[in-house]
Image (cartoon, helix red, strand yellow):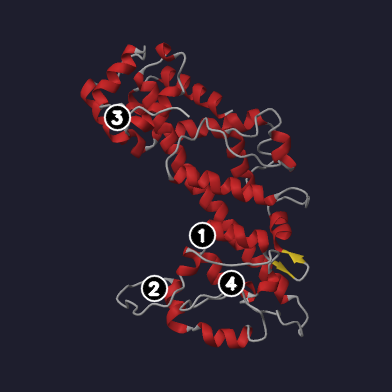
Amino acid sequence: MGHYTFKNKNVKRYIENLYADGLQKSRYLDDSTVVELLERIGIFKFKGYVYAFRPDISRHTLDDVVLLFFFDKYLSRLLMDMTSGVETRLKSVLIETCYQHISKLPRSHPLKNNPFFYLISANYKNSHPKLYGPSVDNWKNKSSVTHTEEYIHYGLYYHAKYDFPSNKRSYLSSSHTLHLQNGVNYPPFHYFVESATLGTIKYLIKHLKIDSFDVMEHVAKKFGIFNPKVDFVSYLERLNEVRNRAAHRERLFNRSYRSVTRVGHYKRISQTIRDHGFMDVYLFLFFMLGKLDFHRYPTIELFKKEEIKRLCRSFKKDYYIRTDSFYLTKRMSRKEFERICQFILKGME
C-alpha cells in the first residue's frame, strides 16, 4: 500500500497548474469570477470533471469543464425527480398488490383484510425478519404534539387517533410477530409504506411472502418483468444507487453503474450501449416509470435524438444553472455548446 503525501492546495495555485498542464483559459469568465466559481465548487470535486478531458486537455477550455460540472448538477436534480417518481410508484404498487391479495383470502383466513400482516414473522421469506431504522422511528410515540400547524402530517394524525396496543389485540393476538420495539405506535401497512425509506421498501418487496404469494414476483410484473428468473432486487439496488449518487452530487454522466438484466423493449432498444453506462441508467428510469414506449422510441437513436437533445436544451435554458454559472450557458456560442453536448453524450454511452 502506498503512503499518502498531503499537498496543500489553494484555488489560485490550482488554476495556474491547470493552465500549465495545457487547459485553455476561459473565454467568457474573468479571472476573479473563475476563482469565485472554483471556491464554491471545491477543488476536489472540480478535479473529477477536469479528469474527464484528459489526455487531450489542451484542446479544451476551462469553460468546457465548468459547463460539464453544471450539466451534472442539472442531471442530479433530474435524477432525484425521476427516482422519486419510481419510489412513489413502487409504494403504490406494493400497497395495492398486498391489499388486493389479503382482500381475496377466504373469510376464515386469519389474514383476511388484516392491515398489520407485515408485522407477522410468517409473512417473510427470511428466517429472522426485522424492521428498524428511520422507517420505524417515524412511529415512535411522541410525548407532545404541536397543534398550531395548519396542516398536520398523517403520522401525527394517526398518533393522535390510534394506539398500537388495541390494534395488536385485534389483529395480532394469535400471531407470532417480529421483534416489536417498545414505544412504537406501529401503523397499518399503507401508513407504514408511505412514510418508509427506499431501503425499507426494498426490504419489504424482497422478503414479504403471504402464504405462497410472493410479493416481489407480483410487484415485478407491474413493472413489466414477467420472468421470475430476472432478479428484480437488482433493479431496486440500481434505483437506490442512482438516488444516492444524485443526492450526494457525485459525478454522474460518465460513471459506471451496477447492471440489471434488461427485459422487453428496454432490452431491444439498448443492444448497442453498455449496460453499466449512464445511457442505460436513463433508459432504465424511463422503463421503471412506464415511459419507455415502443411507438415513441422504436430505436436507441431516436431516444437519443429526442430525449438527450431535450436534456441539453433544457439545461441551457435553466434559470438556476444560468445564474450559478455566471450565465456561461447563455454566453457560450452555439457551436461550443453543441460540441460539449456531444462530449457528454459520448461519456454517457
Which image quadrant for residue 90? Answer: bottom right
Name the foreground residue: 137 vs 163: 137
Element type where label 1 sits in the image: loop
Element type where label 2 sits in the image: loop
Of pointers 1 and 4, the one earlier in the residue sequence: 4
Residue at 65% x, 30% y is 274
Name the foreground residue: 145 vs 85: 145
Of pointers 1 and 3, the one earlier in the residue sequence: 3
Q: Which residue is mark 3?
A: 38
Residue 290 at least partly seen: no
Q: Which residue is mark 1?
A: 197
Residue at 32% x, 14% y is 19
Q: Which residue is mark 2?
A: 152
C-alpha distance separating marks 1 and 3: 34 Å
Name the foreground residue: 79 vs 297: 79
Q: Which mark is residue 189?
A: 4
* Residue 101 as seen in the image, left or right of residue 164: right
Q: Position of residue 56 (x, y in %)?
A: 46, 13
